[in-house]
Image (spheres, rainbow, N blue to C red):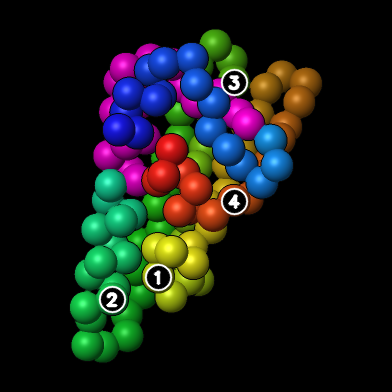
């Protein structure tokens, strides 16, 4: 499961490189819940009979002076299979932003 991966020493793939997620259990649970909520949003979106605006998934966490954010706009993608997520890691002297397929994150 995704949660087990976040509390281990594993990394997450993101468009050609790997990044280390938050290591605290509460942070891992928060990210796992945000992704589960996003998947629920996509299921509801596929069943919806009328067009509407869906809430963005935005998970933010700061640990040891490093800001970590995962963002996905479900309005920009037809299905979860086609969706991409944006990851931002921002430290004191470095900022990394990358985009990757949501399906890659869920499969890991």
Of residue 102 and residue 29, the one placed in the foreground of this image is 102
| Disc assigned to residue 46 | 2
Horizontal relation, residue 65 to residue 38: left or right: right
Image label count: 4
CA gap between label 2 and label 4 equals 21 Å
Q: CA distance from mark 2 to mark 3?
A: 36 Å
- The tag earlier along the polypeptide, 1 or 4, is 1
Residue that numbered label 3 is attached to: 66
Which residue carries the number 4 mark? Answer: 100
Q: CA distance from mark 1 to mark 4?
A: 15 Å
| Residue shown at 32% from the left, 28% from the top | 3
Residue interval drawn in magenta: 18-35
Quadrant position of residue 11: top right
Classify the position of the N terminus by image quarter: top left
Residue occupying the far top of the picture: 64
> 8 above or below 35?
above
Residue at 73% across / 32% down in the picture?
A: 95
Sequence-wise, the earlier of marks 1 and 2 is 2
Which residue is at the front of the view, 52 or 87? Answer: 87
């Amino acid at each position: 499961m995704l949660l087990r991966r976040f509390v281990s020493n594993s990394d997450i793939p993101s468009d050609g490189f790997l990044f280390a997620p938050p290591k605290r259990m509460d942070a891992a649970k928060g990210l796992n819940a945000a992704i589960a909520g996003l998947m629920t949003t996509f299921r509801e979106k596929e069943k919806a009979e009328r067009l509407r605006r869906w809430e963005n998934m935005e998970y933010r966490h700061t640990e040891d002076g490093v800001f970590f954010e995962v963002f996905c706009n479900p309005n920009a993608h037809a299905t979860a299979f086609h969706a991409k997520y944006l990851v931002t890691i921002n430290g004191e002297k470095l900022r990394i932003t990358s985009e990757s397929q949501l399906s890659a994150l869920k499969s890991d």
